[in-house]
Image (tube, grey):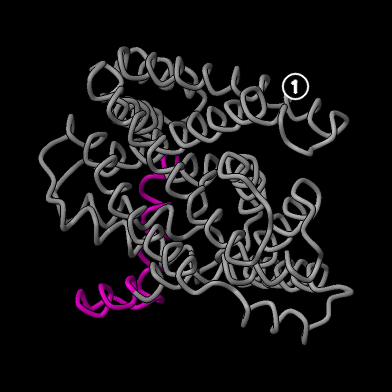
Amino acid sequence: MHLRTAIVSLLALALLAWFLRGTNLTDIWHQVQQARAELLLLSFLMVCLTFVIRTIRWRYLLSPLGDTRFRTVFRSTIIGFGALGLLPVRVGDVIRPYLLARQEGLPVTSVFATVVMERVLDLVAVLGLLALYVWGFAGGSDISPRLLSPIKVSATIAASAAAALLVIMWVLATHPERIGGLAAGLTRVLPGKLSHRVGGLASTFSSGFAATRNARQLSLALVWSFVLWIAIAAQAWAVTIAFGIAMPFPGAFLLQSILVIGVAVPTPGGLGAFHEAFRLGATTFFGASNDRAVAAAIVTHAISFFPPVLGGIVFMAQDGLSFGRLEDLASSARTKEGPAANEVSVLRSSGR
């Protein structure tokens, strides 16, 4: 664990150094001072709104497992994203469902599965908005066809993959016992008790996809996913306009898809990777100067970083938790619910 932490920390420092190469720090500070405060406030409010939306959506996905309280789901979400901002190796992705399951008395593995479902819905929403931009709005932009053409192809391929993931979720939801039996059969080389345990985990995990059996619940969760990512796009758009970067609102759908790729790099809080992804997107597609893009990237990351971190610290203090305790709980969750916890980490794609 310590070696992995050291590696991701070095990676974050290397990415930050690359991000800041050739910049004029005095000019960057001047850009920050000149940014429009009212738009930065709007961006901050949109960040706060996203956590309310995440809570509403998660409750829809959790509803087949049992009743949940808005307050508990909201607090678990804030703590999880706060841990994502400060701790390495995606601890927050594991601790968020684990805390909620313990507090609401729900099956831990099934709650992990709802987080995987969140990630798939995030992917569908991000790719849907990207497709809307590249096929509906980009034609009237200043982006050259040479850059736009591969984006269209990539978006089409990725959208097909997202559709396939939705089908897989439906299969897992409608045939949980069959999936459990298949998993048990594949583990016949293992001791009988362990094989039975793996099969049971697989069956419980697939039952966490139960929301996909109900067309209304799945539709509402998907709608809230699009609302969520439009709000996230609005947060980034407000900052770019505050810094005088000429990006139309639909252009934020392209920028956020680039940011999603950036935060997939496993650095704490997307440090370095988020910044470089923003700089690259703003300079390549929207004509921003390097120093202006760097300044906007730093402020965008700060606005998205501090609300969940500060809120998470407050909620953790109220619950008697520390970051060390969160890491211990995450390790326990990974040990007890290994398959589900690993899936959550692998399918991490929103990052924000």
Residue at disc 1, secondary structure: helix
The answer to whether residue 240 is above or below residue 313 is above
Quarter location, residue 17: bottom right
- Residue 107 lies left or right of residue 139; in this view the side is left
- Residue 5 lies left or right of residue 200; in this view the side is right
- Residue 128 lies left or right of residue 104; in this view the side is right
Chain part drawn in magenta: 311-340
Extreme-bottom residue of the structure: 26
Please, what is the dominant secondary structure of the magenta stretch?
helix
Quarter that holds the N terminus:
bottom right
Numbered-mark total: 1
Q: Position of residue 52 (x, y in %)?
A: 28, 53
Q: Residue at x 63, y 63 (%)?
A: 267
Residue 165 painted magenta: no
The answer to whether residue 162 is above or below residue 296 is above
Quarter location, residue 109: top left
Q: Mark 1 points at which residue?
A: 153
Q: Position of residue 188 (x, y in %)?
A: 47, 21
Q: Residue at x 36, y 49 (%)?
A: 336
Residue 315 painted magenta: yes
The answer to whether residue 111 is above or below residue 168 is below
Q: Position of residue 320 (x, y in %)?
A: 22, 78
Closer to the camera in the image, 195 or 5: 5
Residue type, numbered disc 1:
Val
Q: Residues within 10 Å of mark 1 (few under 14, many from 20)?
A: few
Closer to the camera in the image, 97 or 129: 129
